[in-house]
Image: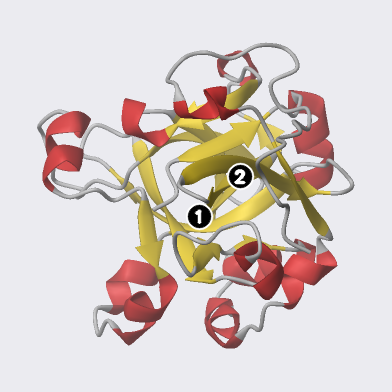
Amino acid sequence: MYYKLSNVASVDEMECVFDAKFKYRDLHFKDPIINGLEESLLPVITNMQPKDIQFGIWGRLPEDYKEDWSVFQDTMNTLNMDVKPCVKDTNKNLFQKRCIVIVSGYYLSYVHEGEVFPFYTYPKSKKPMAIAGLYTTTYDGYITFSLLLTSAHPKVSKYHNISAKMPLTLALENQKKWLSEDYEAIFSMTLTDYETLDFQSHPISRVFYKNNIYYDSFLDPTEYESLIIPT
């Protein structure tokens, strides 16, 4: 499961990259670690309003759900959804509400000789990027969403050996497809967007695994004598 993301992009940068405008600019603040287990907000663009950047709560809820977010997530965690079972689902309504989630990067975990090390993964351009998602609008008007996961690219697997999945990242052309009626083309997509976005990864401080302990240089590379970085 992926439950931590990063967004250190500015409002102006996101508006430029995604050719869309924030509806509520003051709600965004840069955050090196966004913890999905804590009912977090992230900027999203939906297929219904592709020119607006809105905010969604990470963790998809049923549209008629009326209890607290945490109660549902404790029962059924919906931070992530595997794209392959979703495609096989006969309920086409699942794909009527699609979105892209705007982030700066995501985190991987590598287990080596009994210890776990965090890696930060992001485009070399350091520009904000998009992850495919599915969303709902709750009875009281809130957007809630799940990230879509796909099979891990071989380069991701070098730094993430605790699962065989990674977020379904989308380059510009596929972002447009995902938000259009041609969205099913994404289901047959290969892993080329990982190459197109030219990702890189580096180890960061293991403070990552301690909740709410962050500092300015948190995302900087960290060297570990005990870690043999995969090549």
**Numbered tag placed on residue 68 in the rendering:** none
Residue 129, relative to residue 189: is it above or below? above
Q: Which residue is mark 2?
A: 106
Q: Say which of 163 and 89 sits in front.
A: 163
Report which quarter residue 157 is drawn in: bottom right
> Which percent across, then down, holds residue 43?
57, 35
Report which quarter residue 52 is drawn in: top right
**Residue located farthest toward the right when viewing the structure as drawn:** 125
Residue type at the position of mark 1: Met
Q: Is residue 14 left or right of residue 120?
A: right
Query: In which quadrant of the rendered image does the C terminus lie?
Result: bottom right
Q: Say which of 84 and 182 sits in front.
A: 84
SS assignment at label 1:
loop
Residue 173, relative to residue 79: is it above or below? below
Q: Which residue lies at the image location 55% right of the left edge and 38% below the top edge? A: 5
> Which percent across, then down, holds residue 118?
58, 40
Gap between marks 1 and 2 measured at Cα: 26 Å
Residue 72, relative to residue 193: is it above or below? above
Of circles 1 and 2, the one toward us is: 2
Q: Which residue is mark 1?
A: 48
Q: Which residue lies at the image location 74% right of the left edge and 30% below the top edge? A: 222
Q: Which residue lies at the image location 61% right of the left edge and 34% below the top edge? A: 6
Report which quarter residue 226 is drawn in: top right
Residue type at the position of mark 2: Tyr
> Which percent across, then down, holds residue 104?
70, 39
Q: Specify whether residue 96 is in view.
A: no
State if disc 2 and disc 1 touch (CB < 8 Å). no
Q: Specify whether residue 198 is in view.
A: yes
> Which percent across, then down, holds residue 24?
58, 21
Of the residues under marks 1 and 2, which one precedes in the sequence? Answer: 1
